[in-house]
């Protein structure tokens, strides 16, 4: 008698092979009703449960959304990728890099590369994550958080808090924040840290001082427009916390071109500590993220905890004070 396969159970239950596989491996992302239905069918058909023993992970796909695969984003995500590569080399695992967009057939790419596990770095639409989850392979989100998924993130909330607290300690009274889309978990958390620091210092949060910069297609001009609006206020900003260093460097360039002295007229702080931050004139204060550690942690979770309940790892951050916000 031929051995019962996942395909046989899928045909019996009317579910996909990926769903059947995840149900039998007791992975997250489905109802108990579905899980029971699959198990009952497997028992009824005489499925050999020892087939479920997991093979070693030999290939990992590192997925980056095409909106992050840009010059502005690469100083952050390149070191994350390097950290993942380093961990894979150490463990004898092959890593392939795939840039994907919402409209592209991501599952086709996955079939082409045939990975045993997946790392998703940065923001992905919920529907893309749902499609990837259906593949039934171990998956970790890096620099992104979603319920039911294992993820690794910098301490974005703490970083936003430290940056704002630093500016308050230097005596700044009108602290603005330049944010990207709050649909991004990391940006939303940095914004929360900013607001919490103001609240704890009993400083009124002025909505005019919070500006969301469109990230798609407008680049430097969108940041310049945001800075123009902040400097045109009747009581203008005397400090700006930017959600990342690329934005902070563009904001600083705009201020210097307008004849403002940084940090005396306006203090500026970024986030991430990309290489260009320390090399800027004046050097940029920022929140340092260990980007390589994010990539390494993602790989370690896949290789050493692939079947455990979804877990969240938070990588510590550090406030780095440089001349762009240092005020004697």
Image: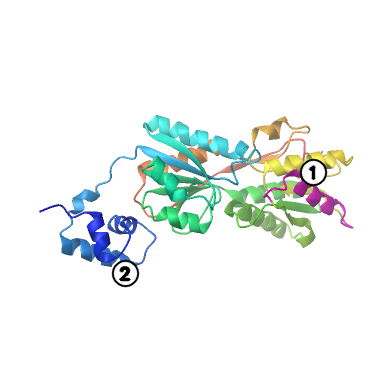
Give the position of the C terminus as an image quadrant: top right
Point 77% across, 35% down: residue:
323
> Which numbered tag is attached to residue 33?
2
Q: Which of pointers 2 and 1 lies earlier in the amino acid sequence?
A: 2
Point 39% across, 56% down: residue:
134
Q: Label 1 crowding class (10 Å Cα cut-off): few <14, some 14-19, many 20+? A: many
Residue 60: percent from the left, percent from the top?
A: 41, 40
Residue 282 among those drawn in magenta: no
Residue 237: percent from the left, percent from the top?
A: 83, 52
Q: Secondary structure at mark 2?
A: helix
Please tell me whether mark 2 or mark 1 is closer to you in this view: 2
Name the foreground residue: 324 vs 184.
184
Q: CA distance from mark 2 to mark 1?
A: 56 Å
Marks 2,1: beta carbons within 8 A: no
Say which residue label 1 marks.
267
Report whether residue 171 is seen. no
Residue 141: percent from the left, percent from the top?
A: 48, 49
Point 49% across, 47% down: residue:
120
Point 62% across, 36% down: residue:
75
Give the position of the N terminus as an image quadrant: bottom left
Q: Label 2 crowding class (10 Å Cα cut-off): few <14, some 14-19, many 20+? A: few
Farthest-out residue, bottom: 33
Residue 224 among those drawn in magenta: yes
- Residue 218 falls left or right of residue 233: left
């Amino acid at each position: 008698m031929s051995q019962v396969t996942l395909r046989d159970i899928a045909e019996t239950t009317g579910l996909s092979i990926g769903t059947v596989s995840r149900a039998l491996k007791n992975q997250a992302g489905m109802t108990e009703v579905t899980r029971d239905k699959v198990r009952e069918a497997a028992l009824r058909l005489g499925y050999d449960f020892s087939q479920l023993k997991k093979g070693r992970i030999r290939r990992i796909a590192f997925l980056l959304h095409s909106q992050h695969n840009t010059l502005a984003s690469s100083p952050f995500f390149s070191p994350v990728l390097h950290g993942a590569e380093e961990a894979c080399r150490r463990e004898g695992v092959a890593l392939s890099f795939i840039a994907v967009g919402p409209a592209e057939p991501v599952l086709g790419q996955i079939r082409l590369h045939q990975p045993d596990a997946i790392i998703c770095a940065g923001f992905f639409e919920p529907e893309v994550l749902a499609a990837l989850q259906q593949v039934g392979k171990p998956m970790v989100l890096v620099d992104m958080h979603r319920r039911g998924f294992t993820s690794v993130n910098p301490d974005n909330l703490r970083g936003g808090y430290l940056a704002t607290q630093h500016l308050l300690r230097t005596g700044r009274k009108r602290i603005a924040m330049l944010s990207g889309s709050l649909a991004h978990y990391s940006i939303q958390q940095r914004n929360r840290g900013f607001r919490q620091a103001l609240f704890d210092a009993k400083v009124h949060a002025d909505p005019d001082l919070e500006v969301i910069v469109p990230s798609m297609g407008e680049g430097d001009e969108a940041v310049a427009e945001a800075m123009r609006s902040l400097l045109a206020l009747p009581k203008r900003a005397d400090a700006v916390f930017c959600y990342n260093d690329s934005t902070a460097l563009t904001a600083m360039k705009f201020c210097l071109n307008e004849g403002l002295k940084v940090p005396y007229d306006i203090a500026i702080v970024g986030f991430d500590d990309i290489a260009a931050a320390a090399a800027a004139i004046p050097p940029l204060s920022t929140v340092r993220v260990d980007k390589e550690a994010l990539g390494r942690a993602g790989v370690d979770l896949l290789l050493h905890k692939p079947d455990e309940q979804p877990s969240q790892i938070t990588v510590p951050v550090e406030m780095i004070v440089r001349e762009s916000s240092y005020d004697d």
